[in-house]
Amino acid sequence: MPSIDVSPLFTPLTINGTTIPNRFIMPAMQRGWAENDGMSDQTIGYYLDRVNGGMGLLISEGVIIDHDAGYVDIGEMHMRPDTYDGWARLGEVIKGAGGHFLLQLWHPGAVRMDGQGRYPDIAPISPSGIFNGEPRGRAITEQDLEDLTAGWVAGAVAAQEAGLDGVEIHMAHGYLLHQFLWHEMNRRTDGLGGDGMADRLKFPLRVLQAVRAAVKPDFIISCRVSQWAEWDYDAKIARTPEELETLIRALDAGGADMLHMSTRYFHNPEWPDLHPTRTLSGWVKEFTDLPVVTVGSVGMNVDLMQTLYSDRDELQTIESSVAELLPLFEDGQFDLVAVGRASIGDPELVTKIRDGRFDEIRPFTRADIFDIAGDLDDHGVPEEILKLAQQAADSGD
Ligand SMILES: Cc1cc2nc3c(=O)[nH]c(=O)nc-3n(C[C@H](O)[C@H](O)[C@H](O)COP(=O)(O)O)c2cc1C
């Protein structure tokens, strides 16, 4: 018998017409296993194992939309006509196993450095041509806005044709759409940037609306949003609950079906001075009836950036995390929970949680992602990003 009653997390939830059997999601995680920028058998097997292990909904690693300024070349996948077949192959396997799957679509923007990647002559692009306060690459033009929007749309339509359940638009962690949402990186004066959230959200919203218009009504669109950037844990795209409300209401009205609120620690209150226990997802639930996802160090004592950039001891804490999640769930602070590293550690994680077999869960260690974490610099992750992220990881929480 389970030592805690986990049954509330094993109730189904319907997202835009698709019923997910439980509340567990595997979030997007790069594995570096792309073949010719596309699907590999290793990737298909890895996802299939998690479907069979009880994961309610899987989200692919971030796949870059078809755009020349998107190539960072860290072993990532790209969405292009010549990679579509692989996704169709995956779609068939997932459907055959009764699973549910979203494809995450992203663009790095100014996280890509000058001269980085396969097209070194193509400048990095970002809302204002700046990164971390310094000039980088060039500011996005109206033509870029059109090309980028078309890239997201083409990727989503291809995901639909591949038989997947939906897409996730990556607006988090410091990448391109997050750069638009963040006042420090988006200093545009053309109505798409500046101090007001209502302006900064316009381009991410345009992408969402264009994708919504191009796919079938029952195709799921998730938006992944974070406050933090990979090199700046104190970043806040929404400085106040009012800014958050503006963003969330716009995404809801713009056609999102699910909001995936990415934090480093799921239990941290977002504005402790305003509410001692309300997490970021809890605040979002105040502003929408859409399903809201929480994430961040479920089952782990250190956060993802410390896994990647520090040598702190990693301990598995699944049972205590689940015990902490349950009251937040009862309190209506989230609808679904994404579990990243722990689901890399054990493909049967969800089934073992359901059965209370916590002792049998294989712990995740950073060695499980050594392909990525061990050689980040060999994979072309810019030195500057490594340095900033390491500083952030070393500085603790
Ligand atoms: C190796 C690795 C790669 C990741 N790649 C992505 C990605 O492509 N897109 C994304 O939105 N998040 C990415 N993440 C973040 C995870 O989706 C997740 O938010 C994070 O690991 C926190 O969850 P956890 O503490 O349960 O691991 C990645 C995380 C890891 C460990």
Image (cartoon, grey):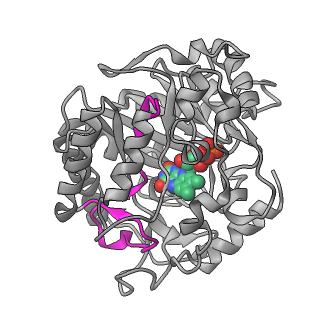
| Foreground pick, 369 / 309 | 369
Residue 78 in the image: state x and y as whole percent: 31, 63
Position of 149 with respect to 296 (left or right) is left
Specify the quadrant that holds the N terminus.
top right
| Foreground pick, 371 / 78 | 371
Q: Is residue 205 visible?
A: no
Instruction: Please tell me whether the stretch drawn in magenta is mainly helix, strand or loop.
Output: loop
Residue 45 drawn in magenta:
no
Residue 390 in the image: state x and y as whole percent: 73, 68
Position of 194 with respect to 18 (left or right) is right
Residue 57 drawn in magenta:
yes
Residue beneath the point at 32% across and 47% down: 207
For residue 13, what is the image quadrant? Answer: top left
Residue 270 in the image: state x and y as whole percent: 72, 34
For residue 267, what is the image quadrant? Answer: top right
Q: Is residue 287 visible?
A: yes
State whether residue 45 is above or below residue 252. below
Residue 327 in the image: state x and y as whole percent: 71, 16
Residue beneath the point at 48% across and 73% down: 112
State whether residue 389 is above or below residue 134. above
Magenta region, residue range: 53-79
| Foreground pick, 345 / 246 | 345
Position of 278 with respect to 52 (left or right) is right
Position of 190 with respect to 275 (left or right) is left
Residue beneath the point at 27% across and 59% down: 79
| Foreground pick, 362 / 23 | 362
How many numbered discs, if any? 0
